[in-house]
Image (cartoon, rainbow, N blue to C red):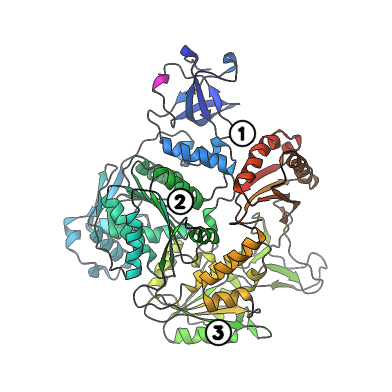
Amino acid sequence: MPNCDTSGNLILKVAVPVPLDRLFDYLPPFGVNVSELQAGVRVLVPFGKRQQVGILLAVADNSSVRMDKLKPATAVLDTQPLLADTDIQLLRWASRYYHHPIGEVLAAAFPVALRQGRPALLQHQPCFGLSPQGRLVSPEQLRRAPKQQALLALLQSTGSAMTAAALSAYKPALKALLDKGLVTAHESAPGGGLAVTKTALPANPDQQAAIDAVIANLGHFAVSLLEGVTGSGKTEVYMQIIAEVLAQGKQVLVLLPEISLTPQLEQRFLKRFAVNLVSTHSKLTDNQRLHAWLSMQQGHAAIMLGTRSALFTPMPRPGLIILDEEHDSSFKQQEGFRFSARDVAIARAKGLGIPVLLGSATPSLESMANVAQHRYQLLHLPNRAGNATAPSFQLLDIRNKRMQAGLSEPLLAEIQATLAKKQQALIFLNRRGYAPVQICHGCGWVSRCRRCDANLVIHAADRLLRCHHCGSEQSLLKQCPACKTGELQALGLGTERIEQTLASLFPDKVVVRLDRDTTQRKGSLEQYLEQIHDGGVNIILGTQMLAKGHHFPGVTLVAILDIDSGLFSIDYHGSERLAQLIVQVAGRAGRADQPGKVVLQTRHPQHPLLETLLSKGYRAFAQSALQERRQAGLPPFGHQALLRVQAGKAEEPQQFLQAVCRKISELNPGKVQVLGPVTAPMARRAGLFRYQLLLQSPQRKELHQLLDNLLPAIYALKEAKKVRWSLDVDPVDLY
């Protein structure tokens, strides 16, 4: 045990990343001047049989534990706090609101490298800039090497050196330009200017009104909702506002829902701003994410682009927070610390006294309700930018129609006509794999996962049956395991099967499939997108990753194959998600000079959701959906918390939730509605039996008061030791 300084009997109050909602007391390490310690430094402490990296939150002169029982901390890892007081206050609030242990909440604010105790030292990064020769060469001279041409144009447009991380998408081209002497490498100190380089594009009156409104709020808290139809130029609005923030010497945090959007937006920002810009998301290495976090935390970076986890990155000069596609459910963490990045971003902006800008073509119903209550300022971009016009919609009733692997004859004719005009078609199906299930034509046996209440999906190219829930795999079967004689067939449609069908129907055309299976290899998505933009693709086929943010100027036809499955969801969020999906996917059509068309195949052409959405637009749908939720007392007019539980034996979750219900009956004054316990919609997953309990109240305060009293009682239950349980405040799905 290391020596410790017991002078003055001062106690370190440390948040340790364990599932216990409390601070832990330690004696200071020997030789440490306790009076100089500040909240927000990392502390290495013994915890059980191992060492843990915790965060110091306070120094006290008393402890609830006897002094002779206290262990000394092993070491203080930082000389200066990594988190400011405002950061700690936000994380404490998030811990209370989401009823999640403070140690795990604080850990979520750090990249993995800092959680592991690595030094918080910002390393110098190699930078690459133009050589004197590179400044004189025209990019046109490299037209036979498109990647090199694009990189040279980028470096010439920025006028400044860029880090290796910022140029990660250009690695082969960068090496080639270095070999040609057009680019030079040098070590650069961490830092960067805050200058704006490129001139902004002319803003139309609606864009200018939105820009002016947000700029007027700089320096104080305000929430603005930028509702702009797809292709209306929301990104240009963001960049012109950011230019003003940078001019004031402030930092900007931009959150995106998907990793796939980050490289595209990063390149647009790099062409516009001569700043130290960093990105952070799960596809980067631990070192890259550490560098991005420290660059922002130390004030060297001016802009951070990131996904949900970037939200808590410290900013010494905060100026603005932007959430693009604010409606997206990816902004809600679905495991561990289940926070909403949108809601916490608003709380963070309020604490910092800065504006937050939410952008979407299909705003969430929660945001629309806040606009109606005058909590948010609504900024509207009703028209597409430039000469682009809104696409037209066509509902194809496919009842009793002849189909070829999910493609109706009228749709195939539309695709053929589009390709004949040298234009691109986009086909959307939100189901990857070859087919959802393998079935025996003789006895009706279907391929089921042994560990989940779900079917095994056929992946024909890999010759596998794969569960999309637990990941288990087995070889594609050649013989029915039940009757041993029946013919096995693929039932249903997946993107892999549609790709095969399109390739056979249009053999002279290039079909590209974009889904999780085809974009796993690093850089593959960027290569596909470049091929699409260069006109080397005729038909684009894919899943939900096509719905967000992509600009495909050559696409004039968008076809959505299977919308019916979303019309009858058991989750009340289902209609909202389907409406958003239709509008977002439709927004890929006709974004340039050519008009766009959207074809929706359905067996329910008279469904009220489709009629309202296509005839009156998303806002009319949202108003109708909000009225339904108000009548039912559902969010945003009610407040929910979902208690999920799972275990290896079916009776254990039931016994646990019955014990929880008994505790609720003792604590609940009757104002919080208790729904359940019931089996989860997927009752068994990865071999575990799953149950849930939904708590609902018209008043947020009453729900949280119950949870404050209930959680300590749950931790004390003997039944809790046999199960895994989690609490989800403001759940975005009931699965």
Mark 2 element type: loop
Q: Identify the mark nearer the N-term, 1 or 2.
A: 1
Residue position for label 2: 281
How far across and how far down the image is residue 672, in percent? 69, 48
Q: Which residue is disc 3 drawn over?
A: 412
Q: Tell me which residue sits at (31%, 52%) in the image.
A: 245
Q: Residues within 10 Å of mark 3 (few under 14, many from 20)?
A: some
* Whole-number angstrom distance, CA of label 3 to CA of label 2: 39 Å
Residue 20: image tag: 1
297 lies left or right of 460: left
Marks 1/2: CA–CA distance: 28 Å
Q: Nearer the viewer, residue 725 or 689?
A: 725
In this view, the mark in front (1 or 2): 1
The answer to which image quadrant residue 135 occupies is: bottom left
Within 10 Å of the Cα at label 2, are there few (<14), some (14-19), or many (20+) other Cα atoms? many
Q: Residue at x 55, y 74 (%)?
A: 613
Check residue 78 in the rendering and tell me which mark sits there, or answer none.
none
Q: CA distance from mark 1 to mark 3?
A: 58 Å
Q: Secondary structure at mark 1?
A: loop
Q: Is residue 455 above or below residue 345?
A: below
Q: Amino acid type of disc 3?
A: Leu
Question: Residue 302, relative to residue 508: is it above or below?
Answer: above
What segment carries the magenta color? 28-36
Q: Earlier in the sequence, mark 3 or mark 2?
A: 2
- Labels 1 and 3 touching (C-beta < 8 A): no
Answer with mark 1 or mark 3, whichever residue precedes in sequence: 1
Q: Is residue 345 left or right of residue 666?
A: left
- Residue flagged by tag 1: what amino acid is it? Leu
Residue 455's spot in the image, x, y percent?
71, 63
